[in-house]
Image: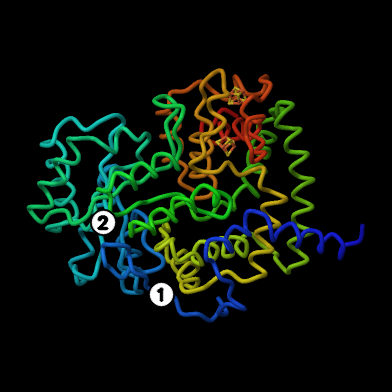
Amino acid sequence: MNTSMNRRNFIKKASIGAVGTGMATGISYANNHPDTETEATTIKEYRRFGRTGFQVSDFSSGFPTNESVLKALLKNGINLIDTGEVYMNGNSERIIGNVIHEFDRNKLFINTKLYTETSFPSKEAVIERTNQSLKRLKTDYVDCMMIHSAENSAILKDEAFHAGMEQLKKEGKVRFVGVSCHGNNWAYNTDENLETILMAAIEDGRFDVILLAYNFVNADIAEKILDACEKKDIATIIMKSNPVYILDSLETTMGRMAEKGKEPDKYTQAFYDKYKQMNEGAQHFFAEYGITDEKELKDAASRYVLSNPKAQTTLWNFENFDDMENILKLSGQKLSEKDNLVLGGYHKHLGHTACRIGCNDCEAACPHHLPVNKILRYNYYFSVKKQEKRAMTKFARLNTQKPSDLCSDCEGYCEKACKYGVWTRPLLVAAQNNLDFVV
Ligand code: SF4
Ligand code: SF4
C-alpha cells in the first residue's frame, strides 16, 4: 500500500478515534496557532474558575520546588498555585510562603491538600493540620483545601474532614473545599475508579473544586467528569495532561539491562521488539507531518487539554526556567487540525503503551491483586516527570509483590481485561526496573 493511501486511511480512522472525542465535547480547532518561537512567555488566557468566581490562568503551578521559578511564574501571570502538606515534607508550602508576600494575595488562588489513607482521626486534627499548612504558607487563609488523592468514595463523606472545613470556613481560613483523585486503591475497593469516585464527589455537593487527571488518551473517562462538573459549576484543575512518554523509557530500561549484562525476560524482549516495530511506524507517520521530536507531540497534547473550556486550568510542574519558557509559550493556544491528526497517530501507533490514569478496570483480574494503574502511574512520575526519588519512594511504600516475580510468567489476565489493549506485562516489568533499581 502506498504512503498516501496509508495516510488517507489513517485520517479516516483518526477522525473517529479517541482524539476525535474532543470534537464531541466542545473542543474547536484553531486554523493555526501562534509561532511558539516568538511568543512571549506570559499567560495569555484567563478563564472563569467555576463557582469560585476567580479568573484563573490557563496554566497553573504544580507544587513549587524552587522560589525563583515560582516568583517568575507569578510575575508572568500564573495565578493558581497547587500544593499539599505531603509534598517535600511541607517544604513546597514553605516555598510558597517565602514568595507570595511580594504579590497581591487577593489575586492568587492557593490550593493545598490533606492526605489520609483511610479516614481523618478527628475534626480537631483536621483543623490543626490546616493551621500548620497556613503557618508554612505564611498566609491567613487558603483558597481551597482538598482531600488529597481520594482513593475511594467513602473518604468523600469523612465527617471529621467536613466538620473541620465547616469551622475553618467560618473562621475565614478556608474559602472552598475540593478533592483530587487518581483512581482507586485496589487494597480497599475493587469496584471504584476515577470516574466513580469523582462522580460521587460531584453528587455530594460539598466540593467546589475538582482536580483530576485528563489527557488525550484518558479522554473517554475524564471528559464525562468534566461534563458533570460543568453542570454543577464546579471548578476544574487538570493534572497529568501529557501522556507522551514511553518513547524513551523502554529504551532506557533495555540500555540499563545491557550495561549490566542482564538478559531481558522473554516478554520484555518480545514487547521491545514489537514496540520498536510500532515505533518505526509511528516515526514514519510523524515524519509525514513534519514532527521530528517528542516536544512537538507534547505541545500538541497540551493544546488538546487547553482546547477544552471545561478543563479550566492545567497544572504544570515547573522545575526550572526552561520549563517556564517552553510551557507559557503555549498559553492561549488551541488544538489545530494537524495536532489532532498527529495525536491520533500517537494513539494508533503507541496507545498500547499508555495505561490510562484513573482506570482500574483490569486490576480485579489479577490473581495477585497488583495495583496495575498505580505502578504504571509511578513509572509515569519517574519517566515523564523525572521525579525519580518521589516515584521510587511511592513504589516502595506500596509494599506490593514484585511485578518481575509475577508478571513474566503470568498468562496476562490484566492484559486480556484491558479494553484499551495496553501491553501491561512488559510495562509492569519495565516499571519495576525503573522504580526498584533491580537491574
Ligand atoms: S501480568 Fe498477571 S501477575 Fe502481572 S499484574 Fe497482570 S494479571 Fe497480575
Ligand atoms: S492496563 Fe488498561 S485496564 Fe488496566 S488500568 Fe491501565 S488502562 Fe485500565
Task: Give the vertical position of 137 relative to 72 (above or below).
Answer: above
Which residue is painted at 64% across and 41% down in the image?
420
* Picture disc at residue 95: 2
> Which residue is more in the foreground, 313 or 308?
308
The answer for how far apart the CA atoms under marks 1 and 2 are is: 26 Å
Query: Looking at the picture, how far across and down is residue 116, in whole percent?
Result: 28, 34
Q: Three-letter amino acid code at disc 1?
A: Glu
View quadrant of ligand 2? top right
Asked if residue 188 shows in the view, the reply is yes
Q: Is residue 222 found left or right of 161 in the rendered image?
A: right
Which residue is at a point 67% across and 39% down the rendered structure image? Answer: 421
Disc 2 crowd, CA 10 A, few/some/many (<14, 14-19, 20+) = many
Sort mark 1 into few (<14), some (14-19) or many (20+) by Cα contacts within 10 Å.
some
Image side of residue 222 versus residue 366, left or right: left
Query: Dividing the image into 4 quarters, which one contains the C terminus?
Result: top right
Residue 379's place in the image compared with 60, above or below, is above
Q: Quarter-wise, where is residue 60 in the image?
A: bottom left
Q: For the point 49% across and 65% down, which residue is it?
A: 306
In the rendered image, residue 85, in percent from the top left (x then y), is placed at 25, 44
Q: Amino acid at mark 2?
A: Ile
* Closer to the eye: label 1 or 2: 1
Asked if residue 319 can be seen in this view, the reply is no
The residue beneath circle 1 is 45
| Horizontal side of residue 18 vs 70, given as left or right | right
Colouring chosen for the image of the structure: rainbow
Q: Residue at x 12, y 41 (%)?
A: 128
Q: Secondary structure at mark 2?
A: helix
